[in-house]
Each structure stands twice: as C-alpha cells, then as structure tokens.
Amino acid sequence: MPFHLFPTLTHASLPARFTYPFAYTPHQLCVKAASEVQAYVALQQQWHDELRLGKMFGVLVAKAPDGQLGYFAAFSGQLAGMALHDFFVPPVFDFMQPDGYFKTNEAEITAINNKIREIERSEAKNVALKHFYQIKRQTDDLKEKYQTQMKTDKQRRDSMRSAGSLSAEQEAELVRQSQFQKAELKRLKAKWNEQIEAAKAAVDVFDNQVAALKKQREQMSFDLQNWLFKNFVFLNAKGEKANLLQIFESSTQPLPPAGAGECCAPKLLQYAYVNHYTPVCMAEFWWGDSPKQEVRRHGDYYPACKGKCEPILRFMLQGLSVDESPVLARAVAQGGVEVVFEDDWYIVVNKPSGMLSVPGKINAESLVDHLLRQRPDLASASLMVVHRLDMDTSGLLVIAKSLDAFKKLQNLFETRQVHKRYTALLNGRIPYPVQPLIHEFNEFPHPVGRISLPLCPDVADRPRQMVNYEYGKEATTFYEIVGYEDGYTRVSFFPQTGRTHQLRVHSAHSAGLNTPIVGDDLYGTPAMRLCLHAAELVFVHPFTQQKVVFCKEADF
C-alpha cells in the first residue's frame, strides 16, 4: 500500500489551500514526507548508480477517506526500467507490460528499424552502390575525354578557316565533322545515361524497400503514439475525465510532448482521485547529480514543468481550492515608480522587484502602465522600454520617449556599448576566481572572474533556460566578489551579453558559480524576493554625446 501515514501530526497543521504547483515554497508536511522518501531512496543500493545520475521525486500529502493523514510518493518516468514499485504510486497508465499492446507494437517498430539497418548495411546494396559509382565515374571520364577531343577538333577547324583558301568541298567536310561529333556525343550520352540508370535502378531497389519500411514505421509510430495519448486518461477533483489529446487540444502545442503524464505531479493526483483521497499539498525534489544542460541541485525542490505538466495539471486541479500564483501575488499594483533621471529623450527608473518590464502573459500592469498612472503628463509620449529586466529583478531601466530615441539607444545595447553592473546575493559562499581578469576591471579592489556558458530556451519547460553548447547562443558574464555575509556571497555582475536569465543560470549552473541567487524560484529556492538588482548603467547619450552614469544601489 503506497499511502504512508503521519501518525503524530494533527489536522491543525494542514494548509488552507492546495499547492500552486508551478511556483511554491514546500509546506512543512511536504518537507517531512520528502525527508522520509529521501531516507528510503538512500537505502536502495540497487538504484544507486541510476539515481546518482539524477531523478525527480514527488510527494503528495493527502487525507484518506477515513480522515487519516499521510502522503503518497512518486518518481518521474521509470525507475530501474520499471514503472511499478511498492513504495510509490503506480503510473497513470502502465503501458510497459512485456506482452501488452505497447511493447508488442514497439517490438514491431524495432524490428522495422533493424530491417532498415540490415538493408542499408547489406553487402548486396554495397555492391550495387559501388557499381553505380563506378559506372558514373567511367561515363563521366568518357564524356570529358570526348568533349576534350571535340574542343581540339574545333580549334583545328577554326585554324583551317583562319588560314583561308578552303574549297566549298573542304568547308562542307568541316561542317560534316562538327555535326557528326555533336550527334555522336548525343548518342553516347544516351548510351551512358542508360548505363547509369540501369545501375541506379539496382540501388533504387534497396532504397525503395527502405522508403516503404520508413513509411510503415512512421504510420505505426503515429498510431501507437495516438493509442498511448488516448489511454492516458486523467481525473480532476470534479470527477471529470480527459485524455492527453483532449487536454492538449486547446494548449499552445496541440500534440502532447513525449513523456507527458509520466511526471510526479499527475501520477500523485491521479492516484489520490482514483482512490478517493483528498489532496492537501504537494512538492517535488531532485535527487542526484545535476544534468549537464539544466540546473538541478541535489535535494532542492522544483516546480512542475510547464511543457509536459501545465496543461495536464490545469485540468487536474479543477475542483480544488488552489493557492494563488506567487507570480501574480508579486505583481500587485505598486505604490509608484522611482524616476532616477529624465530629459527630453529618456526616463531612467528604478523598477521594483515583482513588476513587469513590458506586458506579459500574466494579467498585471507593466512598468509603462505604472508610470503613466503616476505621470498623466506623459500620455502623449510614445513610451518604449529600451531593454528589459526579469519581472523579479529590480533596478535601472531606460524608457525612451520616442521611436527615434528608442532606436538610437537600443543600438547601443545591441552593439554592447552600454556598461551594466548588477548586484546579487548568492545563496552560499563561492571562492575567488582562480584566474582573475586584469584588463578594464583593474580599478576594482577584488579579482574579477569570467563565466561563459551558451544558453537557449528549455522548450519543454519555458521560461527556464538551459546550457547547450550545440544550439545555445553566446553568453558571457564577468563577476566580482564584493564580500561574504552570514554564509551568503555578495557579487557584482558585468554581463557582456544580454540573454534571458543569463545571470541566474550563470550563478546556479554547476559549470558556472554553482550557487543560485537568493530567492531564485526557477534555478534555486524561493524567498521573499529575487536578490538581483540592476545597479548601474553607463553609456554615451545618443543625442548629447555626453557620457552618462546612472547608479542606484540595491536595498538588500
């Protein structure tokens, strides 16, 4: 039985509403449940090597029909090649039975793959290909030799004509030779093409077999995938049912991604609903090493993924009283926007944490909305934010008052002519850089290091970014350790590029500083706020041509 009781806890410990799964601080009941799961997992030596590579686990605190309080546990995907383990809830749909429909069809698709490889690597196809290329080379050589001879003969005929005194019979003979060679070349080309086509036909026999098998494989894979999507049927708290195809039909990606429905959160909620347990709160944690591309820290809690889980959980949570999104809570109307500088072309403001730079997906006012509400006299200006800060990042932002001003300053940002300094508080102590930079940062009292990790979006879990050396764009950050404060590290960042979440990933990733920024609920752990602040901007004013320096230090 996978329901694990809390014998010493009372209902007074329960949260008022269920966890918002995409941004949360784990409830104390979830922390207690997770610690028990971690203790259990640590004892399973047979899983040691697999778990060292990393896996997501989840816990769901629930009330049983008889009122007892306990929790369920789950793991993402499979564990030790299996979807079923006694300690954990079963999958939403177990398609891994050895003789079941999925495995049988998967074996047939695998057999087709093997047949394709067998044909493509066969000696018979290799012989046919060699013969084809041999005929092609031979005919190309003969064609080249014949055309060279035709060119030589033409030069000879041209020389004879240039010498003059050719009789009519001689001129006619020269014309006949030219016409014969052209006709002969046409005949030879037809002959050579026949030889090439015959050799190619022998190769096509194998290519056509492969093409037919690939088409069969594609149809079988499509049919199997749709069978799988239709059999992943989810419940919500209202007792309603929907399969993956129905759930994703109205999402931004109509076709469910691979692995949808196999994450912890859907498994946990499904088991609770099926067995009439009442969900109380939920949390997911990472166990093991961090993947090379993503930011995952051993033992840390993480929100449910957006790409696979958001549409599913949006359906499954219907009927439950769920916490408000902390993102929305942070985006409440602010009292005002501090204007640091203003002239005829630009306004420099100090954006508070929790405010959108520009309108986004959530229904909240942006920086310009706030400024216009505060300054009605700016209603006639064409206000445009020149650059952006993450919603939870505070600090200096420049707003242009016209399209011309916007384009001129944006060009300075794009060509990296704007000096930017950020202040951040990291959740731990980091060492000074081993090989500090010495060039333009000589004026700073502390050594300056360099982080270079290419970044690209995690398409399965936006807005998260990932490190990817193949598809990522260049992202470089210089950093200075300012000092240590009660186990934290205060740093100054000098980004040389402006990628999304660049400073957050460069801080948290194991190949970067391996220490997330305080309050980073995407790459670290939540707190009252994200301790990242755009403290300084330096550039040459596009209209006055004077160097301007804007500075507003962090209040954390």
Image (cartoon, helix red, strand yellow):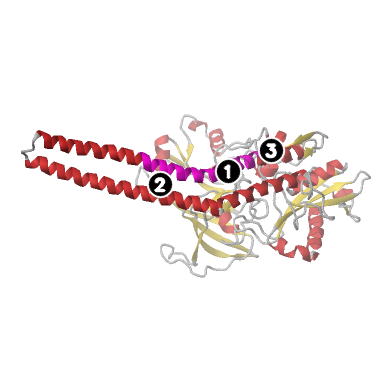
Q: Mark 2 or mark 1, which is nearer to you?
A: 1
Location of residue 210 by image quarter? top right
On residue 209, the disc is: 1
> Tag 2, which secondary structure?
helix
Q: Is residue 175 visible?
A: yes
Looking at marks 2 and 3 on the same chain, the residue that comes earlier in the sequence is marked by 3
C-alpha span from label 2 to label 3: 53 Å
Which quadrant of the figure contains the C terminus? bottom right
Q: Is residue 235 left or right of residue 195?
A: right
Q: Is residue 443 magenta?
A: no
Q: Which residue is rendered at x = 70% and y = 49% of the image?
A: 303
**Residue furthest top in the image:** 380
Residue type at numbered disc 3: Asp
- Name the residue nearer the viewer: 376 or 102: 102
Relative to 296, 491 lies left or right: left
Q: Which mark's residue is nearer the viewer, 2 or 3?
A: 3
Q: Amino acid at mark 2?
A: Leu
Along the polypeptide, which appears first: circle 2 or circle 1?
1
Helix, strand or loop at mark 1: helix
Local packing at callout 2 (Cα closer than 10 Å; few below 14, some 14-19, many 20+) is some
Q: Amino acid at mark 1?
A: Gln
Check contact, mark 2 vs mark 1: CB within 8 A.
Answer: no
Query: How far is disc 1 from disc 3 in space, using C-alphas?
Result: 21 Å
Q: Which mark is residue 412?
A: 2
Q: Which residue is under mark 3?
A: 223
Instruction: Give me the C-alpha separation between circle 2 and circle 1.
Output: 57 Å
Q: Which residues are magenta?
A: 190-219
**Residue sitting at 39 percent across and 41 percent down?**
193
Per the image, label 3 sits on a secondary structure element best described as helix
In the rendered structure, which disc, 1 or 3, sits on the residue that comes first in sequence?
A: 1
